[in-house]
Amino acid sequence: NCLVDHDTSFLKQKAESLDVSKTYTDYQEALKDPEIDAVSICLPHAMHARVAVEAASAGKHALCEKPMAMTVAEATRMIEAAEDYGVTLYVAENAAYAASAVRLHEIVEQGEYLGELTHAEMRKGFQAQDYGYTGRRRWLSTPEMGGTGTWMLHGIHSMAQLRFILGEVETVYVRQHRAASFQREDLEGTMSGLLTLVRGVHVAIVQTPETRIPYPLRGYTFFGDQGIVLAGQTSMQVFSETLDAKDRGVTVDYPEATLSTYAQEMEAFADTVTGIRIGPTTGRSERRSLAIVQAGYESAESGQPVNLKARFGEL
């Protein structure tokens, strides 16, 4: 094991608490270390592409934090470098591993409770008029440090999970709203709009830092020709013609996961590297999530829908 950080005091503290003996203050020195087979890229988003390409050229497998890059073009360079050097590029996108996402994916694909899917809605957000982070995490909301607003920072989670549950997106139409109470003029406010899935179903979405959305409203609503599922974080409410009348509106808990979503993504990365199985959040997969986010920014700017294939080609 090895830890890397330019902050020597923080590095020493973490190494001691985790009982890690090997440390570097320069990541490039770590990439030269022949004993290191894989790296976890936990750097400001604007650095992901450059460091992932350097890791690939050094023969290191990489687990990259989300968003994997700032643009689809950067993500493509990362993917191509990993393929050129024969290493694995994986994305630490834990939202796809949530017990709720796994169960909802099964329900949508099997038509359980719903029948054929006819429409869906996604609502994610919190209220933070003075949106921002402090301390070592300050860069997350500081544009000049590679930070972003909620559409990229949190919306990338939402789009990855939405894709896992519902399938691939074809067209993105997004508009922005800014409440008078939202104080950040340099970052986006509420992003809402309509996604059209490859399967033809429309998904109404909202990702907001302006409105606190409590559970069960925070999450998804799935509409089918046989029922409706209102899905929150830990449970779902089911209204279905497939149930007896007395059971319609019943609340159903999701199965409990044996591992945290973070442990699952690490396990999936290891399984992908060793060839046991291909996990759900590969570089190629999460380039598609990033494409939705980038298209959302472009749609909000132009006022027009963006077809992902026309804009980015085959993803």
Image (cartoon, rainbow, N blue to C red):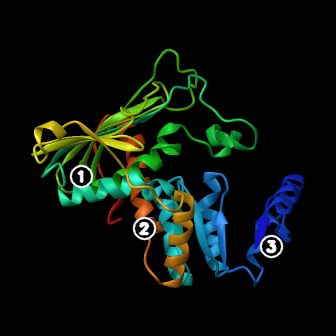
Q: Which residue is mark 3?
A: 29
Q: Which mark is residue 197?
A: 1
Q: Which residue is mark 2?
A: 284
Q: Amino acid at mark 1?
A: Leu
Kindly identify the residue that appears in the image at 82 percent across and 68 percent down. Answer: 20
Image position of 149 (left or right of 293): right
Q: Amino acid at mark 2?
A: Arg
Q: Which mark is residue 310?
A: none
User: Where is residue 56 shown, x and y percent of the image?
Assistant: 61, 76
User: Alpha-carbon neighbours of circle 3 within 10 Å: few (<14), some, or many (≥20)?
Assistant: few
Distance between the Cα atoms at labels 2 and 3?
Answer: 28 Å
Q: Is residue 45 above or below residue 191?
A: below
Describe the element under mark 2 as helix, strand or loop.
helix
Image quadrant where one finds the C terminus: bottom left
Q: Is residue 297 above or below residue 105?
A: above
Lower sequence index among marks 1 and 3? 3
Describe the element under mark 1 as helix, strand or loop.
strand
